[in-house]
Image (spheres, rainbow, N blue to C red):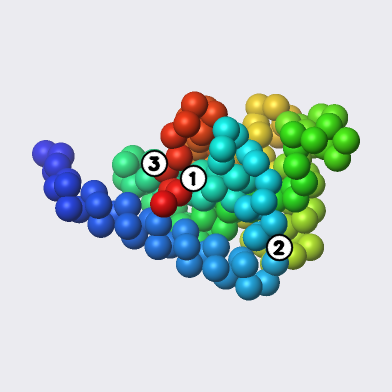
Amino acid sequence: MKQTMTRSARCDIRTEVRKAICRQAKKLEQSGRIDITKTFSQHGDCSVFEHCANVAYVSCMLFRQMGIEADWDELIRGSLLHDYFLYDWHNRKTCHPAHAVYHPTLALHNAKRDYQLTVKEEDIILHHMFPLTVLPPKSKEAWMVCLADKLCAMTETFGKVWVRK
């Protein structure tokens, strides 16, 4: 028989996920340039950083909802760095003409320059735009980020942001 979660338990999980995202973001802020992502717009009025935090949150919540185990640290770090391309993609003068296909490679390059990444984190960053990029994700965490990225992009474009407060 499936147990139903109480409202309090759901709030505790949401709080736990948000705290885990904040912990990883603070670690990344100490050793890299992730703060720059707060200055660039992503979808709607959402910054790149907020989008990445939303992707981390949705990915974690989907894993919890499905009852699938995941490496949360790698999932969150990969999510926070998946759009670490560090430019304004809305500016045609500074943006690569094929941004949608090109930016995962640039994000991975930038992330590897600033951080030590695991194989799974590299997979998350490099393959989050599948099927626009040819190769599919290899890990369940990368697949989930790929899905969450699309869900977040859609909802942010229409005004919903999960993490911002």
Kindly identify the amino acid type of the residue bearing the numbered disc 1.
Answer: Asn
- Residue 17 drawn above or below residue 152: below
- Residue 162 drawn above or below residue 157: below
Tag 3, which secondary structure?
Answer: helix
Contact? badges 2 and 1 (CB < 8 Å) = no
Rounded to the nearest angstrom, the CA distance separating label 2 from label 1 is 19 Å
Q: Name the spot of residue 134 as percent of width and height, x first.
A: 73, 30
Q: Which comes sooner in the sequence, label 2 or label 1? A: 2
Kindly identify which numbered label has been placed on residue 33. 2
Kindly identify the amino acid type of the residue bearing the numbered disc 3.
Answer: Leu
Q: Is residue 41 left or right of residue 51?
A: right
Kindly identify the amino acid type of the residue bearing the numbered disc 2.
Answer: Arg
**Closer to us: mark 3 or mark 2?**
2
Say if residue 135 shows up in the picture: yes
Question: What residue is shown at x 67% (from left), y 51% (from top)?
Answer: 39
Q: Which residue is mark 1?
A: 54
Question: What residue is shown at x 40% (from left), y 62% (from top)?
Answer: 19
Q: Which residue is mark 3?
A: 62
The crowd level at tag 3 (other Cα within 10 Å; few <14, some 14-19, many 20+) is: some
Q: Name the spot of residue 11 as percent of width and height, x first.
A: 25, 52
Question: What residue is shown at x 38% (from left), y 56% (from top)?
Answer: 17
Q: Is residue 92 left or right of residue 48?
A: right
The crowd level at tag 1 (other Cα within 10 Å; few <14, some 14-19, many 20+) is: many
The crowd level at tag 2 (other Cα within 10 Å; few <14, some 14-19, many 20+) is: some
